[in-house]
Amino acid sequence: MHEDSRSNWRHNFLDGHVPSPIQSYLDDLLHRMLQNAQGEVATYIPELGKADPEALGICITMADGTIYTSGECDTEFTIQSMSKPFTYGQALKLRGPEAVLKRVGVEPTGEAFNAIILDEEKNRPFNPMVNAGAISVANLLLGPASQDDMLSLFSNLAGRSLTLNESVYRSKIATGHRNRAIAYMMLNTGMIDNDPEEVLKLYFQQCSIDVTCQDMAMMGATLANLGVNPKTGVQVIEPNYVQSILTLMNTCGMYDYAGQWAFEVGIPAKSGVAGGIIAVIPGQAGISVWSPRLDEHGNSVRGVAVCQELSRRFGLHVFGEKAHSSTVIRRSYPLGEICSKRIRSLSERAFLTAHGSKVMANELQGTLYFASAEMVIRRLTEGASELSDIIVDFSRVHNIDDAAAHLLMAAFDDFLKQGRRIRLSGMRPELPFSACIKEKQRDLANLLLFPDLDDALEAAENKVLEGHFEEFDTAKYEMSKLDLLRGLSDLEYGVLENLVRIYSYGEGEKIVSEGDDAASFYIIANGLADVVINMGEGRNKRLASLGPGASFGELALVEGGRRTADVIAAQSTMCYVFPVEGMLKAAETHPNILIKLLCNMVGNIASRLKHANDEIRGLQ
Amino acid sequence: MHEDSRSNWRHNFLDGHVPSPIQSYLDDLLHRMLQNAQGEVATYIPELGKADPEALGICITMADGTIYTSGECDTEFTIQSMSKPFTYGQALKLRGPEAVLKRVGVEPTGEAFNAIILDEEKNRPFNPMVNAGAISVANLLLGPASQDDMLSLFSNLAGRSLTLNESVYRSKIATGHRNRAIAYMMLNTGMIDNDPEEVLKLYFQQCSIDVTCQDMAMMGATLANLGVNPKTGVQVIEPNYVQSILTLMNTCGMYDYAGQWAFEVGIPAKSGVAGGIIAVIPGQAGISVWSPRLDEHGNSVRGVAVCQELSRRFGLHVFGEKAHSSTVIRRSYPLGEICSKRIRSLSERAFLTAHGSKVMANELQGTLYFASAEMVIRRLTEGASELSDIIVDFSRVHNIDDAAAHLLMAAFDDFLKQGRRIRLSGMRPELPFSACIKEKQRDLANLLLFPDLDDALEAAENKVLEGHFEEFDTAKYEMSKLDLLRGLSDLEYGVLENLVRIYSYGEGEKIVSEGDDAASFYIIANGLADVVINMGEGRNKRLASLGPGASFGELALVEGGRRTADVIAAQSTMCYVFPVEGMLKAAETHPNILIKLLCNMVGNIASRLKHANDEIRGLQ
């Protein structure tokens, strides 16, 4: 994510950048909605009657914090019933779901917001989105510092410091007789166990907090972002309570219009009597609309109309036609089809191609949840009985949910029990799966972890090659066995033997440094060396790994110039070093040495180019 | 998708393959659930009382048709109320949503399944998942061939021919007094306008169809798969009606337990009095459980328990913590960083690197919906004022919903209005977006479509290079200007001029054929040629495109052997052809010709290898 993607799009827009079609659409939508003058401003609390009936603000805040606004998005109004989902979440957190469920149910009522009905069987309010339920929730939150706690909860949700609207609060206390009746009825049935006046005070306070349309969209984005406020990064609500809140907003959030809303709009939402609506598109965005004129259900007329159009226009219905990604398996291939960066001799490469089919590598991508994990384990188990090793690369997996983690772990267990090896790579520590794999690995010798896919491939290749290729002798070598020098006459080998020098390097020692003059080329007699480039910020990237017989720096023969990468001994390593000047001089009398060497180089590089092109085709 | 992925997993399992952890889990779940003997078999229809109270079947059918079963999944029982979502969908299709909404509402009632209550204001049943609503729906479906239509609807949903259970049907007709009362009450209020006995017959028929647990899971998978039966590929329900059906299953599917179900399980579902439950995980799978003992709400005791556990275990709650893929932009890069397969000269390549930053290529992947499209247009518009061309590749985009299509189109319009060029590639015809882009393209000269990204890159490169490099002369050439032959003496060029021959090829003519002896190498004097390999099944793949000055077949000089690809003239093309034998003979007296040529080859191939390695790094 680029840093500026968290900034307000509006600013970019005003700075003269290309306008966003989302911004243009919202401005047009605002313009059209301003024509709609239906409904009446609520007057049952005198303070609410003072609102400007023409006011309209629309705000969309993406789950990454990007904000789109149109109209009056900075004007304050009282949050009213839009506070209910959040105090319910707070009660779940402080009292636990069991205690909360005893005091308020989860059934839609189909009744109006201020209905005085309780569940006949259990005596509790039907759900926390109607007044009775919210008052019961306030009873659960009552404590020594409840008002401060309340303000701090909503300030955390908005990502800025919010305050109480004292005059609305006092107006509510003075006129909230119906809610008073509800509270006393619940005291009578034992649903609330504090002084009803204190409970009502807290309830009236939560409803009297001043917010803007932007604040509410940020609260919605916080729910969309699994409870983390995208502006501040603070986890305000636990993810498991987000699920409960969204469910109740979806079934009960819009009073007796809730069923129709779920049917037509299909976005968890909550409205307030001051004309606000907050709506949440899980994983995507929070939406807020504010316009004071209400319909007969008590919902903002323009607010409902805006949400209806946004849902249709942007395909936001929770049960709408959604395409699920079906390509969680990026590619699968046997060893040898794609090779590690370890440079192998021609004969080693041929052996890997011939015997690599007992090892299957699988690169995963995207998000692993139930159905996508099912595809992965189906692929893994296909033909698994023919395999000795399975490589699974997670470097492109964004997230693994618990369900997928359990399924994968169970599949791995089955393989391991059958004596197969599992090699996992690219398991970033922030994936929750990572910890349980590491835990498991302690007991299981055949569950192997690698930082990246290349390491896993190299280790699997080494295992396949093990015992089939003799190591080069440390003291003596036959030039005719080296790929780069094959096909010369004995006389010509004699000339080379007079030119070559032997150098030894300790582990970690630089053999060649980027930027150095390229005055000689190298063949590894024994040991192992890595070709490494500096990626900046202190990070190195291994381009290739070179074992006995591999050559490097040959381009010096053709181009001279400077080294383009470091070569570092990965272990104690011995190299044959050929000085370029000496070679060119020798070529004057023995041109065939240079011609053969160049031919071998062309063949070698061309084979690597062919392999690289195959790999590109595979990657695409 | 592999063909066998549509087969029954169970078969693979029995064939001795590695077991699926999903299968093992279901078997374990079945075993545990068999211990639960709570609840009572329904007896209000005498036929139902004959069911085996111990029966239990669990079936999960993935949206791609893969089936997992445990227990009694092939035993028939009557569908009962699980038919309601589907007849409702059929009424929406045949009568249209408006007519249906007049006869049945969409509000959850919180009432029992057989409640005799109607919406006071509109006189209609609250929703189609309670008996009154379903009878009202049956009234809408009544017609000359209703019973056949009904059986054919459910057979299409199950993907096999279903039949009526005559004895249950007759039992229902004989004892369905309460439903008779409901029907007459609705006749009284004008909600039904056919003979109530005929309406009830159809309603009793729809409830008396014999199904198995596997049938119901396939019906669920059909809803999960946007209305297309994954076994037969038949679109049984339109996608927009799937949304309505799922919404009502979610809010009203489990009688007066619906709110608690939405809260705890959070999967759209419907239960039937014979002990069946069908549940749908949109985009993922259909689930069915059958076990005849019912709880006090009329839902299968074990069925509810199985769904509760599956939802928790596999993270299936519709508002559960779901990770959304955030990597819809695969990569973005300026022209020159990644090149087309057109082989460019060293100087052309340098020019592209220096001047390519006015063209930005963007490769998209995954699914484009509101929030992911928002990210794309944000990226596209960032710095757009500096660009002349934007390339957008769709070849890895699985799906684009309407919302995303509109947003992208609006963004493209803005660019085009500013005189910039938009180059789109990989837009497969099955993407709905494809048609509207093609429509638009007719009017807009700067909206350019390419079959794949490589074509788009090549065209953009050509545009950048246009006017900066003179074409090679068709009649004469200077050997010293050719990359492959640079650095020779005049005497040596003279030797080559005696060896070279000139050939002309018409468009489409083969210059070199795969498998031919490699006896000469080529340099293009003018024209354009494609290096092509046969991918099997008549498909060709272009590996590279070669313009004037580019060489091919040079490996013949080193390895001899046979051609590994076809080279075909893409237009009228003239080549300089150098015979390998003649070159090797000339090298005996003029070794420097061969040495220089090999050095140039090494430099050229090494530069291509470096580029290929860079591209691999980019792709990873």
Image (spheres, coloured by chain):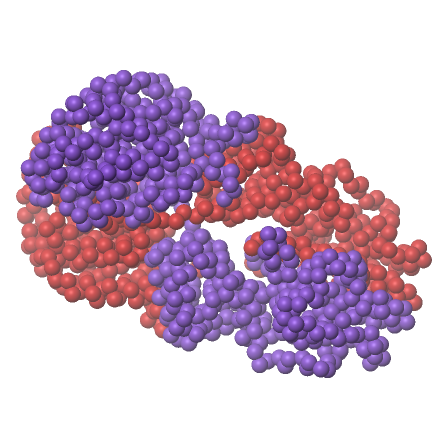
Chain colours: A purple, B red
Residue displayed at 20% across by 33% down: A203
Q: Is residue A52 above or below residue B609?
A: above
Whether residue B158 is visible to the viewer of this picture, yes or no, is: no
Q: How many badges with numbers are in the image?
A: 0
Position of residue A458 measured from the top left corner of the image (x, y, whole percent):
56, 68
Q: Nearer the viewer, residue B270 or A348?
A: A348
Residue displayed at 16% across by 23% down: A175
Whether residue A211 is visible to the viewer of this picture, yes or no, is: yes
Q: Nearer the viewer, residue A555 or B584?
A: A555
Q: Is residue B598 above or below residue A95?
A: below
Q: Nearer the viewer, residue A427 or B54?
A: A427
Q: Nearer the viewer, residue B70 or A422?
A: A422
The C terminus of chain A is located in which quarter?
bottom right
> Does B470 sit left or right of A290 as displayed?
right
Query: Quadrant of the rendered structure where residue A412 is?
Result: bottom left
Residue displayed at 58% across by 34% down: B384
> Does B429 sit left or right of B216 as displayed?
right
Position of residue A414 measured from the top left corner of the image (x, y, whole percent):
37, 71
